[in-house]
Amino acid sequence: MPVFSHISIEFLHLVSKYLLRVFWEGIMSYVKRLVAITGTTGFVGRGIVGHLSGRSDYALRVAVRSEYRALDSGIEVVTIPSMEPDTFWTPFVADAQVVIHTAARVHVMNDTAASPEAEYRRVNVAGTLNLAEQAAAAGVKRFIFISSIKVNGEATQIGAPFTADQQTNPGDPYGVSKAQAEEGLREIAARTGMEVVIIRPVLVYGPGVKANFLSMMRWLDKGIALPLGAIHNKRSLVALDNLVDLIATCIHHPAAANQTFLVSDGNDLSTTELLQHMARSLDKPARLLPVPMWMLKVAAAAVGKVSFSQRLCGSLQVDIGKTCTMLGWTPPVRVEDAMKATAHYFLEHKNDE
């Protein structure tokens, strides 16, 4: 009888532990994960907020410099005037489980700062590491850093793409600052236990895209003949929706912890192919003249536009095999559909400016 009683007590103890665990997991399934996002007025930041807004499993907090109209009334807004090495981030990181850091001093083509290198270090390195230190101290579990493919380098040979874990080779102050921030984040992760996820996007496009991508759409929409019909390079691009989907995957995927990932659409295009895709999406003819690449490079050098010709004629490919295999991820949006969405937005808003 005593043996039976002992077995019964042990059995009841195990059952009670099991029921308690089930009850706790049920409660936790209704607790939203608080995700804090920087750079939410930027192109990528807006995309992340739009993707996560309204989801029942996330509560969102965003850091902004000034007045901000939230997409969802449930989004908490915290004003952070600037991203300095001594910025006070406690109201932003308190109680957050995940921080997604997209804010940065971005790559500037014609930088007028007295010392661009110092400015990039101050914001992209010291500012980022200051945020990460305060996030770790506040108990943030995971810090997702949106870096840049410029950490890997400026160009590749066709068929020899960059990989996530190869030696880095940044070629300008912006790329150097992102590489230094990555290195500092890994040190913080090792010292504090906060998980760090690094994502290096290639050129991001989508509805509302600016810079060179927008310029090319304008040229095509106006029917301007372009001497870009014989460019046989290969460049990786990533649609905003694909990048945001990967970021969302990295919020919760256990295998993402302390890893570096490259991201693209998985469909590399030449500049000529890209323009043809754009023209079809705009329902415009692609007036592309087959001028040889060597002539374009000579002409660009003559007018001091070597870096611009490199972006038009050079190759930059990435291998997303690690990203897909480790995370079980594939780009959910096809290039054709992403191009159509980008063109549709452009046509709707081209007279707004």
Image (spheres, helix red, strand yellow):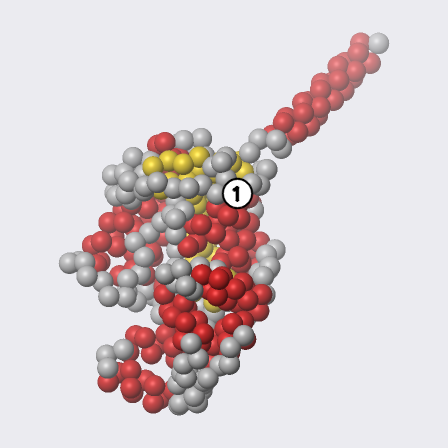
* Residue at 36%, 31% in the rendered image: 91
Please identify the quarter of the rendering in which residue 333 is found.
bottom right
Q: What residue is pinned by disc 1? A: 53
Q: Position of residue 89 (x, y in %)?
A: 33, 36
Residue 287 visible within the image: yes
Horizontal arrangement in the rendering, residue 118 relative to residue 298 (left or right):
left
* Residue at 48%, 66% in the rendered image: 347
Q: Is mark 1 on a helix, strand or loop?
A: loop
Image quadrant where one finds the N terminus: top right
Q: Where is residue 105 in the image (x, y as percent from the top left)?
A: 30, 54
* Residue at 37%, 74% in the rendered image: 311
Number of numbered discs on residues: 1
154 to 328, vertically: above or below: below
Q: Nearer the viewer, residue 166 or 115?
A: 115
Q: Which of 345 and 277 is in front in this view?
A: 345
Residue 21 visible within the image: no
Crowding around mark 1 (Cα neighbors within 10 Å: few <14, some 14 to 19, many 20+) is some
